[in-house]
Image (cartoon, rainbow, N blue to C red):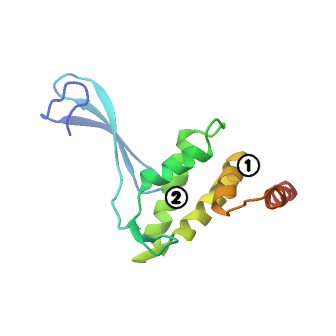
Amino acid sequence: MRCPFCHSEDGSKVIDTSHDARGGIRRRRECKDCGQRYSSYERPILATPLIIKEDGTREEFDREKLLRGLRISCAKRPVSAADLDRLAGEIEAHLQRLGKAEVSSRVIGDMVINGLKDLDAIAYMRFAIVYLKLDDLQSVRSLLDRLIEN
């Protein structure tokens, strides 16, 4: 591992190792050359299915694209980056556990909408208006009423 401070490739000493719920490993390291400490994060790379979009095209799952969409929905809302990263990780892990070669984009959309509902009601509404194609005030009002009832 290259030191992010002095860029030495001579290695580092692992000081501490911890595991997270998604199977990742966090390592606290110390550079052998400059003595600076830093953390690295390792997670297994498992196959994710191809995503079948609404128009029938297929594309690779892109965690960063998912995070961008989540950030847009949660813009100017009190939702932490850690919560967004956790939700994206849960969605990615679920897709990997499915063990399928392809999955509809609706599956991801449904997971996002359910996750946002738990995180922030406004972010949920923002996403739902686009995802559910709510194009009139009556349908938005209906969704809002259902949200308030629950």
Residue 41 location (% of width, % of height): 35, 44
Asked if residue 59 lies left or right of residue 110, the reply is: left
Residue 91 location (% of width, % of height): 52, 61
Q: Nearer the viewer, mark 1 or mark 2?
A: 1
Residue 90 numbered mark, or none = 2
Quadrant of the drawing holding the C terminus? bottom right
In this view, the residue farthest toward the top is: 34
Question: Gap between marks 1 and 2, in whole Å?
Answer: 19 Å
Picture quadrant of residue 48 = bottom left
Identify the residue under disc 1: 121
Residue 80 location (% of width, % of height): 58, 38
Residue 79 location (% of width, % of height): 62, 40
Residue sitting at x 52%, y 71%? 54
Q: Would you place residue 2 above or below residue 54 in this image?
A: above
Picture quadrant of residue 143 = bottom right
Q: Amino acid at mark 1?
A: Ala
Quadrant of the drawing holding the N terminus? top left
